[in-house]
Amino acid sequence: MKKKLSDLADILRSKNAGPYTLTVDFLFNDKGVYETVKSSGSLDEKEIAGYYKVNPESVKIYYYDKASGIKVTIPRRISSGSSCDTDVYGAQQHMPLMDITVDI
C-alpha cells in the first residue's frame, strides 16, 4: 500500500535556513511511521532536486531519530527578499514534497 507523505507526517513545513537555503521538516508523532518512511528510500535527493530544479548534490537529507523527524535542505534558486522572490519566508515551499508516496 502506498501513502502520501502529507498523510503520514504530523507536521510538514518549510522555512528559510538563511537567504539562500530552504529547509523542509517532516515530523512524526508515531515512531513506527517515522521508521517506515526513513527505511523506505522514498526521500531521494535526485527526485527532490527535480521538484526544485536544483543540482542533486546540493540537496541534503537528515534523519533525527530522537525527534522522529526528517530535515531536507535545498538551495533557493532566488534569494529570500530579492525582487523576484514570491515567498520571502520560504513557508510554502514544502508543497511539492507532500505528494511523495511511501510504501507502507
Image (cartoon, rainbow, N blue to C red):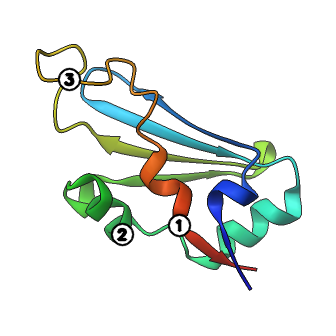
Task: Give me the C-alpha separation between circle 2 and circle 1.
Answer: 9 Å
Q: Earlier in the sequence, mark 1 or mark 3?
A: 3
Q: Is residue 27 above or below residue 2?
A: above
Q: Residue furthest left?
A: 83
Q: Are marks 2 and 3 in contact (CB under 8 Å)?
A: no
In the rendered structure, which amino acid carries the disc numbered 3? Answer: Asp
Q: Secondary structure at mark 1?
A: loop
Q: Secondary structure at mark 3?
A: loop
Task: Provide the residue designation for mark 2.
Answer: 47
Residue beneath the point at 75% across and 52% down = 65
Q: Quadrant of the N terminus?
A: bottom right
Task: Provide the residue designation for mark 1.
Answer: 100
> How many labels were placed on the picture?
3
Residue 90 location (% of width, % of height) = 39, 27
Labels 2, 3: front one = 3
Task: Provide the residue designation for mark 3.
Answer: 85
Q: Are marks 2 and 1 in contact (CB under 8 Å)?
A: yes
